Amino acid sequence: MNQDEFLALALRNPVNVTIIEELARLALPDAWLVSGCLVQTVWNVLTGRPIDHGIADYDAFYFDRDTSWEAEDTVIRTLHARLGHLGVKIEIRNQARVHLWYPAKHGLPYPPLSCSAAGIDRFLTQNTQIGARRAGDGYEVYAPHGFGDVAGLIARPNPGPNFSAASYAAKAARWKALWPELTVIAAE
């Protein structure tokens, strides 16, 4: 699977398209739709399931040097007001702020990031290290590990600095229950 094939499948989910379009309209800095909602849409197409099967939420990232909670809360409220009609859970987070709350929430260190792609790089699984956004008349995709695991329905751990074997096991078990075809690579 190449980038164009991945994008064509991921954009079959009208919610993905609507969120990407709204992020572009809001002109948030370095904004991306990321992770599971993209990958799981592709899995659903490949396995013949309903387009939104198993998608718990839709995650979006942006990177704004204003790291105040008030600024992020304004973005969250604005996006929810504009997209509440979709009836899905949307979580948008300023990646410039993650280091301020992550250690207290997860008990792991989290150095400041320099862009949204750096947040994508820290995802728990390599197969979900993917983001998509509008770029001119088309789309841009960030996928540092490519699309082989997505096409092959493979969950692979990302042994980065914030890796948690317990969190990976829980996520992989949830996914395996929803997509039995999935091959789960064990964490070392």
Image (cartoon, rainbow, N blue to C red):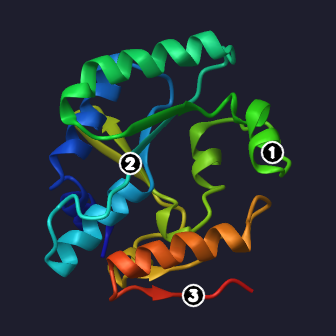
Q: Secondary structure at mark 3?
A: loop
Query: Residue 108 location in percent, x, y?
Result: 83, 52
Q: Is residue 79 above or below residue 154?
A: above
Q: Indicate which disc residue 128 carries.
A: none
Secondary element at tag 1: loop
Instruction: Give, as a three-letter code, the residue at label 3.
Output: Ile
- Image-quadrant location for residue 88: top left
Image check: 168 left or right of 112?
A: left
114 to the left or right of 128: right
Residue 114 visible from this viewpoint = yes
Along the line of sight, which residue is nearer the eye, 84 or 151? 84
Q: Quadrant of residue 175?
A: bottom left
Question: Label 2, on which residue?
Answer: 57
Neighbourhood count class around disc 3 (C-alpha, 10 Å): few under 14, some 14–19, many 20 upward: few
Which residue shows up at 46% across the image and 17% down it?
75
Give amino acid for label 2.
Answer: Asp
- Location of mark 3 (residue): 185
Of the two numbered discs 3 and 2 in the rendering, the one whose residue sits closer to the viewer: 2
For residue 110, the mark is: 1
Distance between the alpha carbons at the discs numbered 3 and 2: 23 Å
* Separation of marks 3 and 1 at Cα, in angstroms: 25 Å
